[in-house]
Amino acid sequence: MFAINKIWFALFFLGFLVAGATGRVEETTLALIAAMEESVNFTLELIGFLAFWSGLLKIAEAAGITQKVARVLHPLLRHLFPRLPSDSPAMGAITLSLAANLLGLSHAATPLGIKAMHELEKVNPTPGEVSDEMAVYLALILGGVSFVPSTIIAVRSRAGSVQPSVVILPILLVSLIGTTVALLTHFIIKKNPKGE
């Protein structure tokens, strides 16, 4: 992290040196201020959007929609997590986290993901090491499968895209392929740990 800070400082410092050498310090400073203002405005608009979708997730949870998604996911999760009891708190947290991700609410799923990892650590046969269940869960989450990538649509819309939702199908296909490859890789390595 410290090295990255040095790199950023060096880039910033060199940029201003070049601006000074070319007589464009004022122009560079104005561009920097405009970029900072745009960043703050963008962040504030995105916060409103994320707050809306997080609230919608809470409504979906209260209405039982996430539980219905969880029931649909249950047979698949039983195969992926055979050692976890179906009434395990870890299974509940995993299911809710995946349901939030499927709805494109990865930001709202983060606390659920942390809870799922905490619960998986409680049933970990080798505490402090990554268990099979943790590896499978990470493959599912990091694949980022989403039916409605709401955050990406919001960013594209804010950036002026004419069709911000055109990315839904490509993102779904790529994330499905990525998740499948990650899971297959895990199970192949698990079955053949010495690379034989």
Image (tube, rainbow, N blue to C red):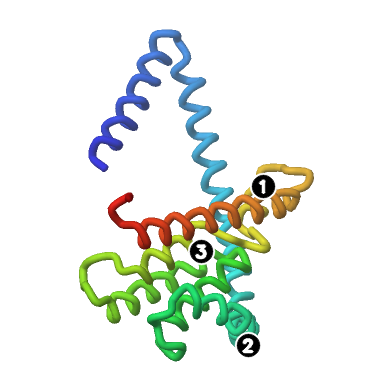
Residue 59 visible in image: no
Q: Quarter of the image holding residue 187? A: bottom left
Residue under label 2 = 64
Residue 156 image label: 1
Residue farthest to the front, as pictured = 196
Number of the front mark, 2 or 3 = 2
Mark 3–mark 1 distance (CA, rounded to whole Å): 17 Å
Q: Quadrant of the N terminus?
A: top left
Q: Earlier in the sequence, mark 1 or mark 2?
A: 2
Q: Name the residue rendered at 73%, 43% in the picture.
A: 161
Q: Name the residue rendered at 34%, 32% in the picture.
A: 8
Q: Earlier in the sequence, mark 2 or mark 3?
A: 2
Counting labels gives 3
Mark 2–mark 3 distance (CA, rounded to whole Å): 20 Å
Residue under label 3 = 107
Secondary structure type for disc 2:
loop
Q: Earlier in the sequence, mark 3 or mark 1?
A: 3
In the foreground, 124 or 50: 124
- Vertical relation: 80 (above or below) 14: below
Percent from the top left, x then y, of residue 180? 54, 58
Mark 1–mark 2 distance (CA, rounded to whole Å): 30 Å
Q: Name the residue rendered at 56%, 55% in the picture.
A: 44
Q: Quarter of the image holding residue 117? A: bottom left
Q: What type is the residue that disc 3 sits on?
A: His
Percent from the top left, x then y, of residue 72? 63, 80
Q: Name the residue rendered at 40%, 75% in the picture.
A: 116
Secondary structure type for disc 1:
helix
Percent from the top left, x then y, of residue 181? 51, 53
